[in-house]
Image: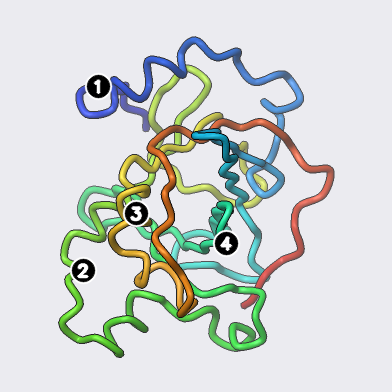
Amino acid sequence: MKRRCAGLFTALLLPVAALAQPTATLADCRAERAVYTMTGEGDDYVVHLVPAQTRAGWSSDLYLRLTTAQRDYWFVFAAAASQGNLTLDPVDDPYAPEARGTGPANTIEALRARWPDAPLDELPSLLRFYALDADLGFTSAQPQQGQPAPAFLLMPELNTALWYHLPALTNDPSAERDPMPRGIFRLTACLDMPPPAAFP
């Protein structure tokens, strides 16, 4: 089911309407081979949808990997039971040996274990995820292996999370605030082969 963009996201989406539509090759791309990019302030930010050997989360078999100039960030998809809205849950590297058995650890839970009073109440609202088709229609479907790759990905408040809540997004003790701009990730390439499947 799709909903047309409006209100909060109009300023973000209008510039995208001027972009060229995905080519036929990109339009045929499967989610696990998709490459999304956003350029801002001289840096490229890249998103891959990485397959899991079994399941990445409760309802998707793909991880979302965001690559910035500083590091990789990993997420699983989560859906609200009542409304079906999608959010991202940050996790450790699913390629790490520690993820082999039960999957990568949730980095929010790891931070709460170290800092029980960590101010994280607003974080879930900052990790909202939206997939858009080539006509800029919203879709509530979670990305899945073998399914068509969305033309655009929108995570409108992820930049705020990377700046104010970075310890909840990575267990790297040397991590510093990551200044990613707000923007839309566009499908720009389709890999010949998907990335190697991650644990579990």
Please tell me whether mark 1 sits on a helix, a strand or a loop: loop
Of badges 2 and 1, the one in the foreground is 2
Tell me the residue that label 3 is attached to: 87
Instruction: Please tell me which residue is depicted at 16% across the width and 65% down the height of the picture.
Output: 121
- Classify residue 9 by image quadrant: top left
135 to the left or right of 50: left
- Give the amino acid type for the residue marked by disc 4 in the picture: Arg
Tell me the residue that label 2 is attached to: 120
Instruction: Please tell me which residue is depicted at 64% across the width and 57% down the height of the picture.
Output: 50
CA separation in Å, label 1 and label 3: 19 Å
- The residue carrying pointer 1 sits among few (fewer than 14), some (14 to 19) or many (20 or more) residues within 10 Å by Cα, namely few
146 to the left or right of 15: right
Tell me the residue that label 1 is attached to: 6
- Classify residue 89 by image quadrant: bottom left
Identify the disc placed on residue 71: 4
CA separation in Å, label 4 and label 1: 33 Å
**Mark earlier in primary sequence (4, 1):** 1
| Residue 4, percent from left and from top | 32, 21
- Give the amino acid type for the residue marked by disc 2 in the picture: Leu
- Give the amino acid type for the residue marked by disc 1 in the picture: Ala
- The residue carrying pointer 4 sits among few (fewer than 14), some (14 to 19) or many (20 or more) residues within 10 Å by Cα, namely few
Q: Nearer the viewer, residue 91 or 172?
A: 172
